[in-house]
Image: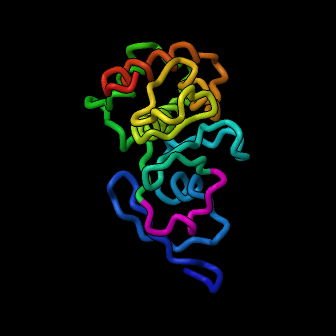
Amino acid sequence: MPDQHSHPTTLTVNGERHDLVLDPRVSVLDALRDRLGVTSVKKGCDHGQCGACTVIADGRRIVSCLALAVSYDGAEVTTAEGLGSVGALGALQEAFVDRDALQCGYCTPGQVCSAEAMLAEAEAGMPSHVTADVAALDPVRLSPEEVRERMSGNLCRCGAYPNIVDAILDVAGERGLA
């Protein structure tokens, strides 16, 4: 039952609309996991430092543990489930499997969401700190250095970084970004 401090909040998660009544302190992460049962979004550090909770909100990647759900009222949220499904993996998910870019798999949903949004950023011409020529950015050409810089907020405790970079570059090449 809502109280005076609860806020009606609508999140469209992987194409499905959810009307929620939330305490204003509830994070996007906790709304997804605890209220909606979307368990691919992982709670790693709960301090915005590891990237395990990365999702895409309105086309931009966010660390969902630090994002208040009420601030994303009306947002379109995409999790790893929204990028593909069992039997019909998305291009990045397939590349991660093909390149063996995971070991324990805990960070993988956040890595895949971050990579998907990162590819869109590069396609839109958004530079990074290592972009050599910020004047010629439509789209940014992704090198291993660009990918490592852009994915630096997503940690992998197993150390699968070389394969993660290779998987992302495979998809970037397919999209004409590498």
Q: Going 55% across and 25% down the picture, which residue do you hit?
A: 146
Q: Quadrant of the C terminus?
A: top left
Q: Is residue 158 magenta?
A: no
Q: Nearer the viewer, residue 67 or 35?
A: 67
Specify the segment rendered in magenta.
Answer: 65-75
Q: Position of residue 108 (x, y in %)?
A: 51, 29
Q: Vertically, is 121 above or below 162? A: below
Above or below for 121 versus 101: below
Residue appearing at x 53%, y 25% in the figure = 147
Q: Is residue 32 above or below residue 70?
A: above
> Position of 66 compared to 106: left or right?
right
Tell me which corner region of the image, top left, top right, bottom left or bottom right, holds residue 97. top left
Residue positioned 38% across, 14% down in the render: 98
- Taking depth in this image into account, of 29 and 130 the one nearest to the observer is 130
* Residue 64 drawn at (x, y percent): 59, 50
Q: Is residue 66 magenta?
A: yes
Give the quadrant of residue 153: top right
Q: Position of residue 19 (x, y in %)?
A: 42, 70
As drawn, 105 above or below 80: above
State whether residue 106 appears in this view. no
28 or 132: nearer the viewer: 132
